[in-house]
Amino acid sequence: MSTELERARDEAERSREEHRAWLRGPSSYLAAVARHELPVGEALRLEGHVIEALPDGFRVDGEPSGPRTVEAGRYRLRLSHQNAPAIVVLDAEAPKADLVPDWFPYDPAFRYVVALEEDLADVAIGSTREQDRAATRAGWFAFAVGGVACRLAALRLREPGTPPDALELYFSDATSGHETYRMRYLDVVVQSAGRYVVDFNRAYNPACVFSPHYNCPIPPPENRLSVAIRAGERMPKGINPPH
């Protein structure tokens, strides 16, 4: 294995350990206990704070704010905008579901360095709370799995708090729904001008696998692969996949 691949594997392993530790912490998805929808222009008094939803963010106790987590004594209030604002309440002291993250062994065959085939378009993708989410399709990444040609649309959500250079892959594959959750995500990393690292070993589960209080993007039809991507995060231990 080359030095570059060894470094990529080691970084993936460190990321997995950090994620395990974070899930046991007070701000993890498993700490979510409630969700309050907050339409733009409306305000809610919650745990000593007054939070108002704005078109481009929030106002917390009179001060403008982007999406973030607000400390509120025992609780933490996660401000989620997504152009359909909501507050997710986290309680570090509440019992947590006994879910343990799990991953496939690192496989360098699922790490690609590829060019982006530019194909700019504004699109809408579905979500787990049946709210369309506005996104920009930056283009396509083409690669092969076991000799089968594949491609995925690279998307950027058009929502407050999303970095302007972010590129994400929302996808499903032949493992989805049994070996892995019904969909997974992957953050694409720029390597050099015009080249990107698409490393499926870094594919991760959405928040909604751990809690029903989140609103997660659903892969568009063109990102539903027929091949198996046995890399990245698997179904968490503690979840019985559907038969």
Image (spheres, rainbow, N blue to C red):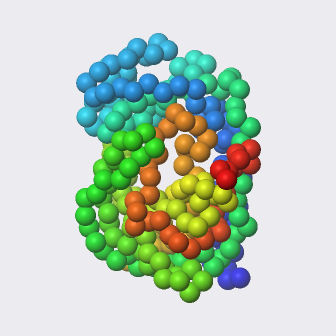
| 84 up-or-down from 116: above or below | above
Q: In this view, does 193 lie above or below 11?
A: below
> Which quadrant would the N terminus be assigned to in this image?
bottom right
Horizontal side, residue 68 vs residue 106: left or right: left
Q: Tally the marks.
A: 0
User: Could you tell whether 133 is left or right of 72 in the image?
Assistant: left
| Residue placed most toward the observer, 80 or 222 | 222
Residue in the image at 40% along x and 63% along y: 221
Along the viewing direction, whichever of 106 and 240 lies nearer the viewer: 240
- Expressed as whole percent of the image width and height from the top left, the position of residue 212 reads 55, 36
- Image-based side of 154 in relation to 26, left or right: left
Q: Residue at x 58, y 37 (%)?
A: 211
Q: Can residue 84 be seen in this view?
A: yes
Q: Residue at x 56, y 55 (%)?
A: 182
- Residue found 70% across the figure and 45% down from its top: 239
Query: Residue 121: where, in percent of width, then height?
Result: 25, 64
Looking at the picture, does residue 59 appear above or below residue 112?
above
Q: Tell which of 21 and 149 is nearer to you.
A: 149
* Residue 105 image position (x, y, % from top left): 73, 67
